[in-house]
Amino acid sequence: MPTVNQLVRHGRKMPRKKSSTAALEGNPQKRGVCTRVYTTTPKKPNSALRKVCKVRLTNGYEVIAYIPGEGHNLQEHSVVLIQGGRVKDLPGVRYRVVRG
């Protein structure tokens, strides 16, 4: 436990909040290349085949991104733009592909 004098000199340090979209490095979007496009099933109460892709970003990170909307033409080596935004019923999917 710190003394009063130590608190006067240094104060309390607030814990730093960990970013939920670390791979974006503070940018609103990031470019990447699809390394694998596939479907996966959601968590317990829901049932579907959600379209996702593994993306290697320009900064070297490899992340899983959700492909929103009905139908897509993405395949391996497609260049995509991703943004933050998790999919609640897909564990590990914390990014979305920007359409258009």
Image (cartoon, helix red, strand yellow):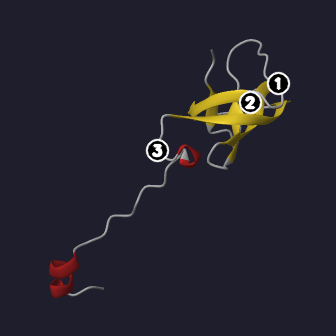
In the figure, 60 relative to 74: above or below? below
Q: Quadrant of residue 15?
A: bottom left
Q: CA distance from mark 3 to mark 1?
A: 31 Å
Q: Which badge, 3 or 2, comes first in the chain's sequence? A: 3
The residue that mark 2 highlights is: 45
Res. 23 in view: yes
Residue bearing the label numbered 1: 49
Q: Nearer the viewer, mark 3 or mark 1?
A: 3
Residue 48 vertical placement versus 2 (above, below): above
- Disc 2 or disc 1, which is closer to the eye? 1
Q: Is residue 48 left or right of residue 24?
A: right
Residue 30 is drawn in which quadrant?
Answer: top right
Amino acid carrying label 2: it is Pro
Q: Residue 26, position in %: x, y?
A: 46, 44
Position of residue 7 in the picture relative to residue 65 (left or right): left
Residue 25 position in % (x across, y down) = 51, 47
User: Looking at the picture, how far across and down is residue 29, in whole percent?
Assistant: 53, 33
Indicate which disc residue 26 carries: 3
Is the C-beta separation of discs 2 and 1 under 8 Å? no
Mark 1 neighbour class, 10 Å CA radius: few under 14, some 14 to 19, many 20 or more: few
* Residue displayed at 33% across by 64% down: 14
Q: Amino acid at mark 3?
A: Gly
- Kindly state the secondary structure of the residue where label 3 is placed: loop
Image quarter in which the N terminus is found: bottom left
Numbered badge on residue 83: none
